[in-house]
Image (cartoon, grey):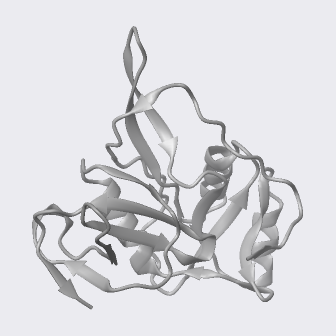
Amino acid sequence: MVVNNSAKVGRDSISGALSDGKCSLTEVTDRPAMAATPWCAIQTRYRFERKVTAQLQRQGFETFLPVLKEIHRWSDRRKAVDTLLFPGYTFARLDFSPLPRKEMLKIGGIVGVVEFSGTAAQVPARQIEDLRKLLSQDVPCALHPFLRAGQKVRIRDGCLDGLEGILEEAGQKSLVISIDSIERSIAITIEGYELELI
């Protein structure tokens, strides 16, 4: 994976709070989906994800910033906290003509567009749709080591009907959803759901 600018990106530190792992949707989106324009992953500077997303919106790009709403518990209180699902990344539909891309790269906080072999890595619209669907439901989920290969399945009932991912059966049965371009995955427990092979 290559990013077309070379600025350093920091890592998130781990807080002392405990999380119950519930997911909900905090999504940033601008205009109706333009099916012909591909989604791309944009790498940002440390803690610039929200600012970059807002600036992309102001320039007319459709964006998606996946955020988990988690309940963190301290000894004296509980609080709902928005946590970025993929720190250091946001997603946008990009027209790859030179002018819009050049304008986008002028935005402060952007490290670059994720690329493979000099070409922007497109994120399948299905992966964005599945993330939106998952985050719109109050189901437990957690970050998971990235998976590329395995038995692909689709959920066939309930609130997650149509969600696709890789089946993992070590211990609890889980469905792993992966975003290939940024090599990140999340897992949800799927006991009780009806599955079909893809």
Where's the N terminus, which quadrant?
bottom right
Please determine whether, in this image, residue 146 is positioned above or below residue 46.
below
- Residue 43: horizontal and vertical position, in percent? 71, 61
Marks counted in the figure total: 0
**Identity of the residue furthest to the front in this view:** 171
- Residue 193: horizontal and vertical position, in percent? 13, 68
**Identity of the residue furthest to the right in this view:** 6
Q: Residue at x 57, y 29 (%)?
A: 15
Q: Residue at x 75, y 65 (%)?
A: 104
Identify which residue, 138 or 184, lies in the foreground.
184
Identify which residue, 90 or 51, lies in the foreground.
90
Instruction: Describe residue 92's horizontal placement relative to residue 195 as left or right.
Output: right
Please determine whether, in this image, residue 16 is positioned above or below residue 106.
above
Instruction: Describe residue 141's horizontal placement relative to residue 105 as left or right.
Output: left
In the rendered image, which quarter is residue 41 located in?
Answer: bottom right
Q: Residue at x 44, y 52 (%)?
A: 27
- Residue 106: horizontal and vertical position, in percent? 83, 60
- Residue 57: horizontal and vertical position, in percent? 59, 56
Q: Residue at x 27, y 91 (%)?
A: 198
In the rendered image, which quarter is residue 174 located in?
Answer: bottom left
